[in-house]
Image: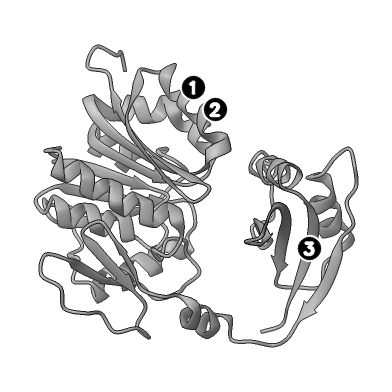
Amino acid sequence: MTSWKITVAGPRPQIEAALLAHEDVPDWDHGIVIAGSEIAEDQPDDWLLEAWLPRKPSRADKAAITALFAPAPPELIIEQLPETDWLVLSQQGLEPVRAGAFFVHTPDHPAPEEPGVRRFVIPASQAFGTGQHATTAGCLTMLTAMKQRGVTVRNFVDVGTGTGLLAFAALHLWPRAIATASDIDRVCARVIEENAAANAIPAGAGPGELTSVIAPGLDHPLLAARGPYDLVIANILAGPLVELAPDFARALVPGGQLLLAGLLTTQEDAVRAACRRVGLRLAARLVNGDWSILWLRRRRDARA
C-alpha cells in the first residue's frame, strides 16, 4: 500500500495548538491521520506534526493542514512513503504492555503465564486502543485501581471503544456487569466482534455479556435505554470530552464513576472545568507521559 506523509516542524506549543485546532474541525477528513511528538528525547521542546494520507496530498489536503497553524502558514514537508504492509510493520513494533491487572499483546508476541493477570491479545488494526498508547495503558491501570478501592459496577458503557479493549478489561473486573461498547467508526463493529471472539468475551445483552453499537458519543436509543450507568469510560479526545461532559453526567447514576482519557496534561484544566460545571468531581488522576487519565465521580446531589 502506497501512502504519503506531510510533516511540519515547530516548537512544542505551536504543534500542540495545531493538534487542538484539529479537534475542533467538524468536517475533518478522517482519511488524514495526524499525530504530534517530540523530535528526540534530548529535544523535548522541538516537535513534529505528522499527517498520513492514503493518497497524494491534494491542494485541499495541504490547505487543511496549513489552516491548523493559522495565521502563520508553516513549511510543509511532503513525502511519498514506500510500499509497505503497515499492519505487519505496526505489529512488529508493538511490544507487550503490562498495565494494572492486565497484559496486552499482539499475536506476534507470546504472553507469559502470570497468576492473577488477565491476558488480552489485540492485533494492530484500523481501530484505536491496542494497549500500547499511554492513554489506553493508563485506563487499564485506573480501572484496576477502581476495583481495588471497592468500586462496584453493575452496568457500564465504553464510549469510543476502538478495539473494545477497555470494555473487555472492565468486564473482567466486574464479570456480572451489563456491558456496552460504542464507537462512531463503523470499522469498529467488525474489529470488536473479532477481538471479543479471540479473547473469549461473550456477546449478548445479559449480565456478563458485551453489546456493541455504532453511535456518536452517547447519542443512540440503545445507549439511552441501557442507562443510567455505574461507570462510563471515554478514551477519546479533549475536545469531545468537553462537549460530552453534560451527557456523561446525565448518563451516570448519582455517585457513578467516570473514567476519561485521551487528553494531554495541557488540556486537563479545560476538561476538568467542563466536568465541574455538571457536578462531576475528581476522585483520582494519573499522568502517563504527556497524557492525563482522570477518574471522576458524579455528585450524589447533582441533578441529571
Give the quadrant of residue 113: bottom left
Visible residue check, residue 239: no
Task: Specify whether residue 91 is in view.
Answer: yes
Q: Quadrant of residue 31?
A: bottom right
List the residue tagged with mark 2.
270
x and y percentages locating residue 244 in the rendered image: 46, 32
Of labels 3 and 1, earlier in sequence is 3
Looking at the rendering, in which quadrant would you find the N terminus?
Answer: bottom right
Q: What element carries label 2?
A: helix
Residue 211 vs residue 118, the one in the foreground: 118
Q: Name the residue under label 3.
A: 7
User: Disc 1 on helix, strand or loop?
Assistant: helix
Q: Which amino acid does label 2 sit on?
A: Ala
Side of 97 relative to 115 (left or right): right
**Residue name at image x 35 percent, y 65 percent:** 192
Q: Image point 48% across, 36% down: which residue?
A: 241
Q: CB atoms at circles 1 and 2 under 8 Å apart? A: yes
Which label belongs to residue 255?
Answer: none
Q: In this view, does 37 lie to the left or right of 74?
A: left
Alpha carbons under labels 1 and 2: distance apart: 5 Å
Q: Is mark 3 on a helix, strand or loop?
A: strand
What amino acid is at disc 1? Ala
Position of residue 239 measured from the top left corner of the image (x, y, whole percent): 57, 37
Q: What residue is drawn where x is 37% and y is 51%?
A: 138
- Residue 209 horizontal/vertical position (percent): 16, 57
- Picture coordinates of residue 247, whole percent (x, y): 40, 29
Mark 3 residue type: Thr
Image quadrant holding the C terminus, namely top left
Q: Name the residue under label 1.
A: 273
